[in-house]
Amino acid sequence: MDKASAKKRLLELTRLLQHHNYLYHTLDRPEISDREFDKFFAELQELEQKYPDLAHPDSPSQKVGGSVLDAFEKVSHRTPMLSLQNTYNEQDIRDFEDKIQRALQGAPQKIEFYCSPKFDGVAMELIYENGVLTKALTRGDGYVGENVFNNIKTLKSVPLRLQAESPPVYFEARGEVLMLKENFRKLNEQQDAEGEAPFANPRNAAAGTLRQLDSSIVAQRPLEFFCYSPGVIEGLALKDNSAFEELIKEFGFCTTVTLGDDGDYKKVFNLLKENKTNPLRPPLSQICSGSDEVVAYYNFIHSLRHLLPFEIDGIVVKVNSFRLQEELGFVARSPRWAFAGKFEPEQATTVIEDIVIQVGRTGALTPVAVMAPVTVGGVTITNATLHNQDEIDRKDVRIGDTVIVHRAGDVIPEVVQVVLDKRPSRSKKFVIPLTCPVCDKESVLIEGEAVRRCVNPFCPAIMKEGLKHFASRNAMNIEKLGDRLIDIFFENGLVKTFSDFYRLKKEQILELDRQGDKSADNIIKSIQKSKKTTLAKFIYSLGIRHVGEQTAKSLANHFRSLESFLSASEEELTAIRDVGPRVAYAIRQTLENKNFGKEIKHLIDLGVDVQLPAQKSRGAQLANLTFVITGSFAQSRDAIKALIEDHGGATSSSVSKKTNYLLAGEDAGSKLTKAQELGVPVLDWADFEKMLLNK
Ligand code: IVH
């Protein structure tokens, strides 16, 4: 393609991919299949490689990251990013309205407030010049922030260009970068599977990620940006915060959607409970008139707290009118026109009875506090990880201490702080022992890492954890082999290596205490069943450092055979999208180990059957099923068709006895009648979605 045509095509592709990114990620309503998207994306990348000078600054290829910085540039905010005055109860909220009333002469009787949840993430200011993202500033000290542009560019929910025919000349969008609870949980699982330290809570995960100097790491972490307030805007006048919210939705940002006048709290509660809202557009903001309504809103959001897909720590209440905001102005470092209604953190007090050291699959020595059982947010907590020595020192946690605990991201128990008044008089600082508590060999502290590790490959704890990983659900999936049973097999010398599982005999199991004939049979059966596996699962189950499920999938999709994976050079590995030099090195190190190579051969000789990856698709939930689509849906017909095909199903245009399901939208007509006559099951959109998710 010549340069002029390439230029034209690149612009087309950039706009097209931006649009589909937005539909997929922000609106949760894709119109093309992943495969089609990948095709366009590959075309774009190819053209950009050929003509680097033609790449647009807002090209979707920017979202994969790649640049590595030495440090972030410091930039002044044109208007400072301030903090909010806090209130903690009903009376505080009422007092606030009174204060505002007094400050405003001739104000309306009831002031209109724009209320939203207070996100517990990292504040960010995005700057768009002539519609194109040019800077992304952290709050810093409120006056000077750091430009984390390269990192922010990789966020799927950040538009690199405002969706507008004639965007404002200068536009500052302020909001919060955060990690959804679900993604936080997955990230920590992945960190764990890869032998990395977990993050303490979603906010730390988001903050830590934004501080990365290598933007390709950021591109792999799922962060969202929720926009909630304007900074400086030039070339556009807005009346109030409601108008701003409408505008940013159009521009392509994620934001909480306004409930509307009739704000039916109960309906929203049920929607969230049943997981039926778009997590990037939950209907959670509300216009409230006067403090009675604000108090009701505060209680409503409080009751929803644990159902929300992200962490919040209160509500934010703003005077809706920008004219009134200006009139009210500022006190010290906060606006007089807004306040936060904070929730008391859900915490509890308990006593640390012991600190034990756990040895993980990668040899990491993790200190864990064993506490007197206590309930937090309805769940009983007994253990909390203390992460590493630095964390223990920072919080100065000791055995016998009374501590405050909470659950980070609503999941992970965390020690918040020690109640020093209650510290026993003869307590001693806790130091992680220098030797592994299981094998007694010296542990090491690798430079640049926070955790000590046992590096003895024959450490029983490491071997045992490796076996558990191998048998686990997302690895070889040996269903009947729970952790306890593996402990017993290991301690009785029945299983020491992966391949020993496949050498197990029923008689050996029967010799163990309390194993009956039936259960021994079941164990053998499930071991046999696990032999059939996929290349991705097989690679993952080997437990190679840094190779989590996602990386294993990328490796499988790249190599497509076990032999080519086993013989890949470090260079070839590094060339794969999800594989950095550190991962490639770890893979080569492991595979070059003679015993490891032999072990893989044993597995194959014993009948492990590694299926090679098929065509890329989202799954086979709908395999062998034929659908007929009728009526109208929020998505286009083509999009639904692609979705069905992507999940292994087929579509047909007329209903017959062979039709497995009729997918019926609004105003379905003759096809619906025919399906009912023939007894073909009819699905609505919700049924269909359930089918995609559950089956
Ligand atoms: S509006 C003058 N809306 O709260 C600031 N802020 O303590 C007006 N925050 O650092 C901001 N969720 O990062 C607003 N829905 C929301 C918010 C929100 C969280 C944070 C913001 C700021 C802090 C102020």
Image (spheres, rainbow, N blue to C red):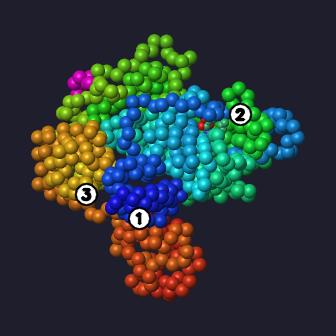
Residue 112: x, y in percent?
Answer: 78, 46
| Left/right of residue 51 with respect to residue 661 in the rendered view | left
Q: Kindly give the residue lying farthest to the right in the view shown.
A: 106
Give, as a three-letter code, the residue at label 1: Ser
For this view, does 87 lie left or right of residue 138?
A: right
Examine the image and state in which quarter residue 184 appears. Answer: top left
Distance of label 1 from label 3 (alpha carbons): 23 Å
Q: Residue at the spot x=22%, y=60% of the render?
A: 611
Q: Which residues lie in the magenta part? A: 435-444
In the picture of the structure, the residue carrying the numbered disc 3 is 534
Q: Which mark is residue 335?
A: 2
Query: Badge 3 local density, few (<14 within 10 Å), some, or many (20+)?
Result: some
Residue at horizontal 49 percent and vertical 26 percent from the top: 351
The reply to whether the C-beta atoms of the residues labelled 3 and 2 are less than 8 Å apart is no
Element type where label 1 sits in the image: loop
- Mark 3 lies on a secondary structure that is strand
- Please tell me which residue is depicted at 15% across the width and 53% down the height of the picture: 563
Asked if residue 354 can be seen in this view, the reply is: no
Q: Amino acid at mark 2?
A: Pro
Nearest to the eye among marks 3 and 2: give it: 2
Residue at numbered disc 1: 33
